[in-house]
Image (cartoon, coloured by chain):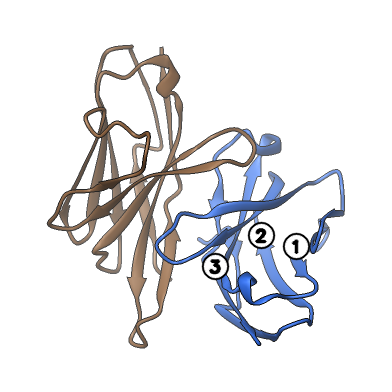
Chain colours: A blue, B brown
Amino acid sequence: DQQVKQNSPSLSVQEGRISILNCDYTNSMFDYFLWYKKYPAEGPTFLISISSIKDKNEDGRFTVFLNKSAKHLSLHIVPSQPGDSAVYFCAASANFGNEKLTFGTGTRLTIIP
Amino acid sequence: GAVVSQHPSRVICKSGTSVKIECRSLDFQATTMFWYRQFPKQSLMLMATSNEGSKATYEQGVEKDKFLINHASLTLSTLTVTSAHPEDSSFYICSAIRWDTRFQETQYFGPGTRLLVL
């Protein structure tokens, strides 16, 4: 049973436009959510996180939105740049990040110049 | 969908003992698996890349004699923490790569193993 789902395996966005990556979760115990970015042949690197006490967290071009009632979060990247092309993983944890991470299957983002 | 399992899900051991953690791809063959160590809040450290039939590739700073990795089959990789110490206490997460017919890779993560060394 996939507790964290990323239903879009791939996404293509024009450079300069907004990229929106979506993630859904089913476990109501999750209260801490993270996005990781992964380049080929490298491990995932942390990008941005959000706690369930907030509904938005912003860091530069990256914003994560959390809709607890819908059990849905999204990552917005604006403006999108060619270097953003990578696989993005959504992850969730309970106990405000002190429990095991549960990962989605990733979305491959391609930024078109 | 593809599933990756880990066993055990949690283990408590005494300092100085060795602990083996298994990572299995349940419905696909994985020539490549990864082992990660999770640190509080956000940090996920890649420890090593496990390749079926060959030696694992360790990341800088990871002791290969302490963290033994064996990828004995296309569906199983094991991580053995030798002479475990309390500072080795952590979550250990594996992942496996599946390739589709278009040669695109998808990485599936295991559920993690919680290791507590007393």
Which residue carries the number 1 mark?
A: A73
Give left or right: position of B94 versus B81: right
Pointer 1 and pointer 2: residues touching (CB < 8 Å)? Answer: yes
Chain bearing mark 2: A
Pointer 3 and pointer 1: residues touching (CB < 8 Å)? Answer: no
Q: Quadrant of residue B36?
A: top left
Q: Label 3 to label 1, Cα distance in Å?
A: 14 Å
In the displayed structure, A52 sits above or below A103; it is: above
Give left or right: position of B3 versus A3: left
Which of the numbered marks, if any, corresponds to residue A25? 2
Q: Label 3 to label 2, Cα distance in Å?
A: 13 Å
Q: Position of residue B89 (x, y in %)?
A: 44, 24
Q: Position of residue A29 (x, y in %)?
A: 68, 44
Chain bearing mark 1: A
Amino acid type shown at disc 2: Tyr
Q: Label 1 to label 2, Cα distance in Å?
A: 8 Å
Number of residues whose C-alpha sits closer than 10 Å to that of mark 3, classed few (under 14), some (14–19) or many (20 or more) = many
Q: Quadrant of residue A86?
A: bottom right
Amino acid type shown at disc 3: Gly
Chain bearing mark 3: A
**Helix, strand or loop at disc 2?**
strand
Which residue carries the number 3 mark?
A: A106
Amino acid type shown at disc 1: Leu
Q: Position of residue A59 (x, y in %)?
A: 81, 54
**Helix, strand or loop at disc 3?**
loop
The residue depicted at 60 percent of the width and 33 percent of the height is: B40
